Image (tube, rainbow, N blue to C red):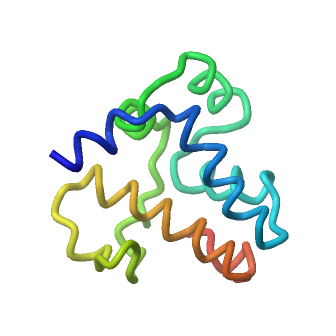
Amino acid sequence: MENKKVYSMKLSKISPLLVAKAEKKNRTKYEVNKIIFNLTGYDDTSLENQLKKDVDYETFFNEAPQFNPNWENIKGTICGCRIEEIEDPLMRKIRCLDKMVDMLAKGKDIEKILI
């Protein structure tokens, strides 16, 4: 049931939270977007279109133009879970994005985060 709650959350609500998390640590929206683009294949226009359509998180990930083929190489812990042990592919992708933004907020160089 928890996954369904996450999947149904609106991108328009989550996106500002990801940016705020980064900005609290003196990072930028540009850097967060760069991570999103790298992971999902969206660009400025297509991301803005998804925000305007007010899609949920599941739709956002399922409609990703070109999910980075290296996404499965992202490892580590986020929200107390090991990413590589998450069985649900959609939840694993969501947690990968969380992990990448987390790394940004912790001060890691953007070029070392991108996959």
In what quadrant of the picture does the C terminus appear? Answer: bottom right
- Seen at 71% across and 55% down, the residue is 20
Up/down of 39 relative to 102, above or below: above
The total of numbered circles placed on residues is: 0
Which quadrant would residue 103 be assigned to in this image? bottom right
Q: Is residue 13 left or right of residue 85?
A: right
Q: Quadrant of residue 5?
A: top left
Q: Quadrant of residue 12?
A: top right
Query: Residue drawn 33% across and 78% down?
Result: 80
Of the pair 25 and 35, the residue shown nearer to us: 25
**Picture quarter with the N terminus:** top left
The vertical placement of 36 against 54, above or below, is below
Give x and y (percent) for residue 34.
71, 55
Q: Position of residue 95 (x, y in %)?
A: 39, 62
Q: Is residue 31 left or right of residue 79?
A: right
Residue at 24% x, 55% y: name it.
89
Name the residue: 21% across, 75% down. 85
Q: Position of residue 13 (x, y in %)?
A: 56, 37
Instruction: Name the residue at the top extreme.
Output: 53
Q: Give left or right: position of 69 versus 15.
A: left
